[in-house]
């Protein structure tokens, strides 16, 4: 998801080029900014929103939009345009991990261990001008211990 100031042909194409591999099929509603995608190497499947086909093909799009609105209104009680991209990033992070609840503690522990190690490496490298290879040699026993 990407926050844009204006939805037009240029922003739609720019997003598609950044996020979608050429040759993929893009299913969209009937908005007029999308037909140009076909000439850029994408297969464009246009679904008119008022048809029964739209409910089937765009179900997840509608569900995600609804969930984003609920997050913004319910959790943040509105939003500031300045932070919109951060809100969307957080939503994507939560949505992509919604079925990982049973892994939450292990993933948090893993992030804490690697995060603190990353900070130590950054400090050694930037403050003490120690090469990354020398840092690896210093921390090698600790890295092996984490692997067990």
Image (cartoon, rainbow, N blue to C red):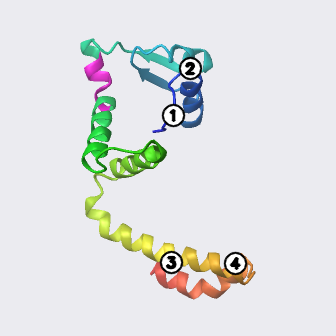
Q: Earlier in the sequence, mark 1 or mark 2?
A: 1
- In terms of depth relative to the viewer, which is nearer, 87 or 64? 87
**Nearer mark to the viewer, of 1 and 3:** 1
> Which residue is at 59% across, 30% downward?
14
The quarter of the displayed image where residue 106 is located = bottom left
Q: What residue range appears in magenta?
A: 54-60
Element class at badge 1: loop
Question: If the image is split into quadrants, where does the N terminus sit?
Answer: top left
Element class at badge 2: helix
For mark 1, what is the residue?
Answer: 4
Left or right: 120 as drawn, with respect to 84: right
Number of callouts: 4
Q: CA distance from mark 4 to mark 1?
A: 37 Å
For mark 4, what is the residue?
Answer: 125
Q: CA distance from mark 4 to mark 3?
A: 14 Å
* Badge 1 density bin: few <14, some 14–19, many ≥20, Cα 10 Å: few
Element class at badge 4: helix
The quarter of the displayed image where residue 50 is located = top left
For mark 2, what is the residue?
Answer: 9
> Which residue is at 31% across, 65% downward?
104
Task: Residue 36: say if magenta.
Answer: no
For mark 3, what is the residue?
Answer: 116
């Amino acid at each position: 998801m990407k926050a844009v100031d204006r939805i037009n042909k240029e922003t739609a194409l720019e997003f598609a080029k950044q996020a979608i591999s050429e040759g993929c099929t893009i299913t969209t509603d009937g908005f007029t900014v999308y037909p140009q995608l076909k000439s850029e190497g994408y297969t464009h499947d246009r679904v008119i929103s008022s048809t029964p086909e739209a409910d089937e093909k765009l179900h997840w799009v509608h569900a995600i939009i609804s969930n984003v609105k609920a997050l913004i209104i319910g959790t943040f009680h509105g939003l500031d345009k300045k932070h919109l991209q951060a809100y969307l990033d957080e939503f994507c992070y939560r949505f992509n991990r919604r079925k990982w609840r049973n892994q939450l503690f292990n993933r948090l522990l893993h992030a804490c261990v690697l995060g603190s190690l990353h900070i130590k490496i950054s400090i050694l490298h930037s403050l003490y001008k120690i090469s990354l290879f020398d840092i690896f040699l210093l921390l090698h026993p600790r890295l092996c211990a984490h692997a067990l």
